[in-house]
Image: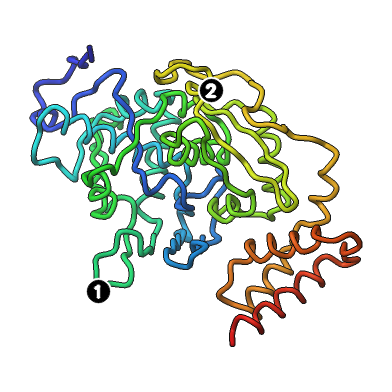
Amino acid sequence: MYTHLTVRRAFDPQFDLFVPFIADLPLRDQRETMERPFFSLAKRKRLKPIEYVSPNAELFVNVFPNPEFGMATIWDADILIWAASTLNNLRKQGVNDLPRTLSFQPYDLLKTICRDTGGQEYRRLREALGRLQATTIVTNIRVKKGKKHRQFGWIESWTDLMDDETGQSKGMTLTLSDWFYEGILMDGGLLAIDPAYFSIMGGRERWLYRVARKHAGGAGEGGFAIPLPTLFEKSGAEGTYRRFKFEMMALIRRNELPGFDLGLELTTGEPVLRMTRRDLIDGQNRPEKRRRAGPRHPATAPAIAPQPLPLFRDRVLTDDTIASVRRDFPGWDIYALKADFDAWIDGKDGRDPRDYQAAFYGFARQFHKRESH
């Protein structure tokens, strides 16, 4: 049973429009925002845009920060999760005309996303709303036929009704963008998430949970596997692939994602991350109930083995090599080329190049010349 917060200042008629607080609100996340790079994964102010193109070159996501506010972060996205969950709950209750503008008490929202409710958190809530409105997204995901892309902010506007005497908030509103609102209403547009998600501290770990929930949640016992370079591209993370890979290795070793086990599969090329639902591994057909899972052994074997890692380091493409290949031989999936190149190296003894970067560039050049004619 859900409990409703009944304490309201009845003399203010605006409170009749407010979304009622529901303890243990069933949480939902918008499916299309869960795997691609829509948010900054760092708490510091990000001013570098995200420019992502899918491996098949069919989809793109560009995210542009505001010079004053920066880019919306993955912690700011908690507000969008609250909004999606609230609208989904209203729909479950039989409300047909779901509002795009939500009126709410800041206290209620903060409690739902497991934040403190002191003055500092109210300030951070306002800052987050500012970033969600100021960040500009341009994408062709869910674009109607005949159009090239859509441009929007996460929220169209927001307000904070202040008490003139106390200076405290009497209530807030936010209006969702059309794109995000439509994603909530579409069939299959929402996925349930574990409340323990809000206890995840790291930005990359939060993003990895959303990827696991999106892809491995319904993938069965085999889970979902993805090469680390592809995962890096999908993250939109700042910094180098080498740094991203190091941090992913640490997350795999800790293996603490709520509801999912992480395993590293060693290949002749770059390592592959496999994500598997923990309740299937445990042989239980029920949702994960733990608030936060402790460390576990990865589900797949072999786990992280130290012996092959020097080979991985030798075969990591540098940022300069990636940039050169993309500039000189555009249109090809660079990591698919790398997999072919590594397979060619391993196909015969004595093919290990002295300069891996130069040899890969030459391989890409020959491939481009051959396949372009």
Kindly identify the amino acid type of the residue bearing the numbered disc 1.
Gly
Q: Which residue is mark 1?
A: 146
Q: Within 10 angstroms of label 1, few (less than 14), some, or many (20 or more) residues?
A: few
Tell me the element at label 2: helix
User: Vertical placement of 187 versus 320: above or below?
Assistant: above
Quarter the N terminus occupies: top left
Residue hosting label 2: 281
The answer to whether 66 appears left or right of 238 in the picture is left
Question: Vertical placement of 149 versus 66: above or below?
Answer: below
Q: Residues within 10 Å of mark 2 (few under 14, many from 20)?
A: some
Q: Which residue is drawn at the image coordinates 52% and 17% (left, top)?
A: 282
Say which residue appears at 46% left-offset and 29% top-offset. 197
Which of pointers 1 and 2 indicates the residue nearer the eye?
2
**Identity, as a three-letter code, of the amino acid under mark 2:** Ile
For image coordinates 21% across by 36% down, the residue present is: 87
Q: Secondary structure at mark 1?
A: loop
Colouring of the image:
rainbow
Residue 326 image-quadrant placement: bottom right
